[in-house]
Amino acid sequence: MGRRIWIVLAFLLSAMECVSAGPHLFRDDEAPPLPGWVAFCRRNPEECVVDPRQPETLPMTEELADLLSSVNLTVNRGLIPVTDRNHWGVVDLWSYPTDGMGDCEDYQLLKRKLLIEAGLPRRALRMTVVIDENGEGHAVLTVRTDRGDLILDNKTDDVLEWFRTNYRYIKRESAETTGWVFLTLEPAGTSLTSSSDR
């Protein structure tokens, strides 16, 4: 009986946290980049440059929603999931899934590439690291909009608001410089929204 009460309390606290969560995540201190991302940037430096002239957030429109949904669905259903260990024989390798196979970050890199080719600014599309429902590290793509941060994920075909994913958000690519920043729910740090929204 006692265990059931704790489960119910945990569920209620989780639900309350989601209800009070804001539409945006905020940047905190600089964070160390992942080695796989660093190696990816060495091979593809143009993929990691931050252009401050680009907008940091996108206006949320029906066309943008349709594009995000289409790209998320197409990539999720078009690739075969495989770990880097089984695919390449290494722990972590960030790369485009040119052979039709990849793990979480490869899915998100391809989605970002397709969205950029469709005309979206790279600066509003941030690779993001979370802790998933199994307590494991996982990569998703954050799309920053004026109505909140949206998540593209290979675990679901739905494009979700960040707080509806049940993930714990750790860090993402910086929108100010080449590098990474820790994430927080509190706007005490420098907001990752555009300077006009701060």
Image (spheres, grey):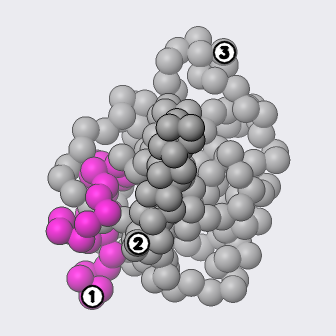
Q: Main secondary structure of the magenta part?
A: loop
Element at badge 1? Answer: helix
Q: Circle 1 is placed at which residue position?
A: 196
Q: Is residue 147 above or below residue 135?
A: below
Choose top left, top right, bottom left or bottom right for residue 13: bottom left
Secondary structure at badge 3 equals helix
Q: Nearer the viewer, mark 3 or mark 2?
A: 2
Mark 1 residue type: Ser
Q: Which quarter of the rendered picture does the C terminus lie within?
A: bottom left
The residue that appears at 27% across and 52% down in the rendered structure is 181
User: Residue most toward the top?
Assistant: 89
Nearer the N terminus, badge 2 or badge 1?
A: 2
Q: Is residue 79 magenta?
A: no
What is the span of residues highlighted in magenta in the rendered image?
171-198
Q: Which mark is residue 20?
A: 2
Q: CA distance from mark 3 to mark 2?
A: 40 Å
Tag 2: residue type? Ser
- Coordinates of residue 47 in the picture (x, y in percent): 45, 50
Q: Which residue is mark 3?
A: 86
Q: Residue at x 43, y 30 (%)?
A: 36
